[in-house]
Image (cartoon, rainbow, N blue to C red):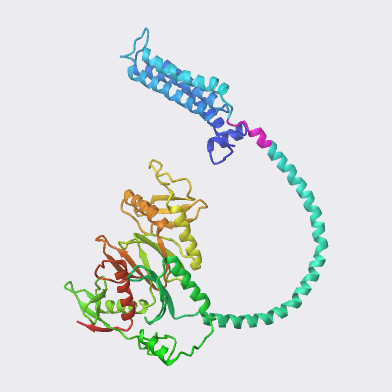
Amino acid sequence: MATDDKQDGGGLYRRRIGTPTTTDEVNGYWLFGFGVLLGLAGVAVFLLTESATVARGVGYALAALAPPFVMLGAVIRFPLRRTGTYLGYLGTAVSVLGVVWFVNAFPDGWLTASGDPAVITVYGVGLLLIGVAGTVVPLLSDPVYEDYERMRDEAAAATATAEKAGEELAVTRGELASTESELEAAREDLSETEADLEATRDELTAAEAVVASLRESKARFELFEDASGKPRWRLRHRNGNVIATAGQGYSSRGKAQQGLHSVRRNALGAGFLRIETPVEEAAAVADDGPEPTDATDPDMAIPDETEGPESDATFELYADTADEWRFRLRHDNGEIIGDSGEGYASKSNAKRALSKLCDHVAAADYLRIDPAAFEVFEDAANEYRWRLVHQNGNIIADSGQGYASRSKAQQGLDSVRSNAGGAGLEFPDDEEAEGRAGDGESKATFEAYEDRVGKWRWRLVHDNGNIIADSGQGYASESNATDAVERVGEYAPDASALVAGGAAFEIYEDAADEWRWRLRHRNGNVLADSGEGYASRSSAVEAVTGVKANAPGAETVEQ
C-alpha cells in the first residue's frame, strides 16, 4: 500500500482526503487537478488575447491539454492492470503531441474553417487511448489489487492467532514459575560441580600446552610436480633442508594430498621399530644411495639455524647502469638462479630487501598462476585477507577488509568463487548506464561507481548487503573498470588458492609461453623473481627449489 509519508503529495492526500490504497490513486488525484488548472488557464489566456495570434494559440493549447490530463487522472485511480495504466499514459502523450503540433501550425498554417485533419486525428487518437484504458481494459482483465481483501482477512486471522498465543503464553508463564524452584535446586547441584570443573581446567590447560608444543613445527610440506610431471610431496625444514619425501610419484594431485595428510595424521603417534638387517643386505642398501638426513637430529650434519645452511650460491650486490642497486643469486656453476627484479634507490634499501628475501624464502609455498590465483595472507594488523593475482603480476581483486581468522577469509574467498562468474553488473550512481545481466544463479552483483576523486571502482555486493570483494584500486575510465569486472568474473571461479605465510612463490606462464617464478611478500611487494623464463613448469619449480635451498645461507658480495 502507498503509505509512504516521505512523499509530500501522498502525505497531503492522506491528511486531507484519506488513506490511499495505491500510489496511482494519489497520482491520479493530482493529475486530475492539474488538468482542471490547465483548462482554467486556457480560458483566461483566451479572454486576454486577440484572435489569430500566437498568444491566442497558447490559450487554445492549454484548454486542449485539460481533457487528456483530467481523463488520465480519473483513469489511473482505478485498480487497473499495469497495461491499462501504461495505455493511459501513452494516450496522454499522443494528445500532448497533437497539441504541440497545433501550436506549431497556428495561426498561419491552421485552416480557420476546417482545421488540420492530421492534428485533430492525432489529438483524437490520444483521447481514444485514454478512454480505452479506462473502459475496455478493466472489462478484459482482472484488477491488480484483487487480493487486497484476502490479505486483510489473513491479517485479521493472524491477529486472532496472536491473541490466542498470548493466552497460551500466560498459561506457560505459570508453568515456568513452577519450574523455577526446580531450576534453583539444579543451580545448587551445578555450583557443587564447578569446584570439580575448576580442578579439571588446570589439567586441561597443561594438556593444551603440551599439544601446542607438539603442533609447532619448523618445517612445511611442499606439493610439487617432478621432472616426469607426477605430483609428489616433501617436508622441508625452514632452513631449506628436505626432511622427508614421498618416495614415489602419484597419479594425481589429489592422491598426493591424500598421502601427505596420511603422513601428518600418523607420524606424530607412530612407534619406532628397529629392524636388524644382515651385514650383506645393509651393504646392498647402502649402495643404492646416500642415507637420508634427519633434520631433527642434532648429531646429523645439518647446519645450525643461527649459522644458516650450507649454500652453493652467492648473492651479488651491484649498481646497474641507471645507478640503482640490485642483487642477484649466482650459483657456483655460474648460472644466475634469481634476481631482485627491480632496482632500489640506495644500497641500504637493496640490503633490506635481500634480508627480507632470506627470511621468507625457505618457508615460502608455491602458487600456480594460470592465468590467475588467490592468495590468503595475514596483514600487518594480524588480520587475514585474500587477493586475486593475475599472471602479469597485477592484483585484480582483493577482500577489501580483514578477517579475524584464516577460515573466515577462506569463506569469503569461496563466496567470491561461487558468485563472481554469474554476477550481473549495475551502475548505482548512473541511472542511464546500461548494466550487464547475470545468469540468475549468482547471489551477488557487481557495482561500478565513481569515487570522490573521479576514479572508477567496482565492488561485489552479496544479496545480504555485504561487500565480499572490491577492485582495491581506481581506474581512469568506466570502460577500464568494466573490463576489470569481466576479468574477475572469468578468472575467479577456477582460480587456485594458497594460504601463504610471510611470502609465497608464484609460478606462472608469461606472454612468451615461458614459465617464471616470483617471490611475493604478504604485503604484495615482489621480493625476487627468476630473471629468465623456463621451458616447462617443472623447470621453474626446480629453480624455486634451488633458490629455497641456497638463498638462506648464501653469502653477499658487493660488485
Identify the image quadrant of residue 47: top left
Q: Nearer the viewer, residue 144 or 430?
A: 144
Q: Position of residue 274 (x, y in %)?
A: 50, 88
- In what quadrant of the picture does the C terminus appear? bottom left
Asked if residue 150 is among those painted magenta in the image, a careful observer would answer: yes
Whether the magenta-drawn stretch holds residue 497 is answered as no
The percent position of residue 324, horizontal first and vertical second, equals 21, 73
| In the depicted structure, whether residue 336 falls above or below residue 470 | below
**Residue at x 72%, y 80% (from the top left corner):** 195
Q: Residue furthest top?
A: 113
User: From the viewer's perspective, is 193 left or right of 413?
Assistant: right
Frontmost residue, 302 versus 351: 302
- Residues in magenta? 144-152
Closer-to-camera residue (315/69): 315
User: Which image quarter holds the N terminus?
Assistant: top right
Q: Answer left or right for 130 relative to 430.
A: right
In the rendered image, residue 67, in percent from the top left (x then y), is placed at 48, 19
From where the camera sits, is residue 526 visible?
Answer: no
Residue 86 percent across, percent down from the top left: 48, 28
Give the residue at x 44% y 49%: 423
- For the image, the number of numbered tags is 0
User: Height in image: 114 above or below 339?
Assistant: above
The answer to which image quadrant residue 535 occupies is: bottom left
Q: Which residue is painted at 38% across and 70% down in the image?
A: 224
Residue 350 higher or lower than 131, as above or below: below
